[in-house]
Amino acid sequence: MTSTKTLLLAIALSLPLASGVTLAAETSTHDHSSGAPTALELNAGQKWETDAPLRLAMGELRQTINQALPDVHKGTFDKPQYDALADYTNKQVAYIVGNCNLEPQADAQLHIIVADLIGGADIVSGKEQAHPRADGVVKLVETLNRYGEFFNHPEWQNIALSH
């Protein structure tokens, strides 16, 4: 998890240079304190509210992974495709970190999703050699499906993992 937090911090620190967002806004919105939740929870029994940047990035990520899944299942998804998917996932995460503006409790819950997306992207990229790259795609699908269970994203559809 340390490499995940390091990567997330590196992404957050690089965003002000790329997007003009101030570092002060980034650090105040995305605090990674030790008091952060470690398990997803609903907001008093309701899904957490989202904003347009989060819905945009998660929707695009869902679409891309859903389109890749049949080839992953068939074993025809090749190394360059896995590399591109990992890179795309990390770019969507960077967009979320740089543009999403949720209330603090929802943001804390989103950090769990973001960490899982980064972990999945690490496996997809081949950085986690103990796992096949396809396992990373499965982790990404599971993370996106969990996002849909805990965040209010109108018209969200989970991705089926069956072959």
Image: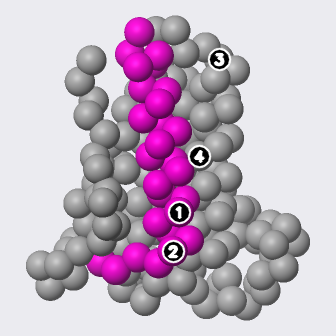
SS at mark 1 in the image: helix
Give x and y (percent) for residue 100.
56, 76
| Image quadrant in which you'd find residue 95 | bottom right
Q: Give the crowd class for mark 1: few <14, some 14-19, many >=20 residues within 10 Å.
A: some
Residue at image mark 2: 52
Which residue corresponds to mark 1? 56
Q: Is residue 57 above or below residue 49?
A: above
Residue 72 magenta-drawn? yes
* Location of mark 4 (residue): 89
The residue sitting at the front extreme is 155
Residue farthest toward the right in the current orientation of the protein: 17
- Name the residue: 30% across, 71% down: 152
Task: Name the magenta segment's main secondary structure.
Answer: helix
Residue 131: image location, x then y, percent: 45, 24
Along the horizontal axis of the image, is 160 left or right of 29?
Answer: left
Numbered range of the magenta stretch = 48-74
